Image: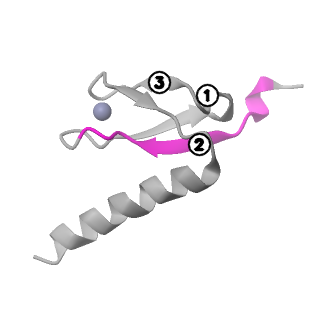
Amino acid sequence: MSSLDTDSIRIICPNLACQKLLAVPEMARGEVVRCRGCGSNIKVPASPSQARETIQSAQTRVSGEAAA
Ligand SMILES: [Zn+2]
């Protein structure tokens, strides 16, 4: 009943100059949200598996840069 119990999901801004971690409500799945960092419109993944894939690819990119 309480909207305060709504789960949130985390997405990373696809803008390479921003990559801000955004928390959006579960109800926003499949919708487009606006990044608070750069104002880009971001499509929220409709399924948890897609969200995890996005995070993994971001982490791979970060670790690759750190290796240098
Ligand atoms: Zn952004």
Specify which label sits upstream in the sequence, 3 or 1: 1
Q: Which residues are magenta?
A: 3-15
Residue 57, quarter of picture: bottom left
Q: Which mark is on residue 9?
A: 2
Vertical position of residue 27 compared to residue 61: above or below: above
Q: Is 44 situated left or right of 61 in this image?
A: right
* Tag 3: amino acid: Val
Residue 22, quarter of picture: top left
* Tag 1: amino acid: Ala
Magenta-drawn stretch contains 13: yes
Question: What is the crowding at mark 1: few (fewer than 14 residues within 10 Å), some, or many (at least 20)?
Answer: some
Alpha carbon separation for disc pair 3 and 2: 12 Å
Is residue 13 in sight in this rendering? Answer: yes
x then y, percent, for residue 54: 44, 53
Tell me how many marks there are: 3
Residue at left offset 16%, top offset 68% = 65
x then y, percent, for residue 47: 63, 46
Residue most extreme to the left: 68
Residue at left offset 62%, top offset 51% = 48
Specify which label sits upstream in the sequence, 3 or 2: 2
Alpha carbon separation for disc pair 3 and 1: 8 Å
x then y, percent, for residue 31: 55, 25
Vertical position of residue 7 compared to residue 35: above or below: below
Task: Give the labeled residue for mark 1.
Answer: 28
CB atoms of marks 3 and 1 within 8 Å: yes
Say what secondary structure mark 1 lies in: helix
* Tag 2: amino acid: Ile
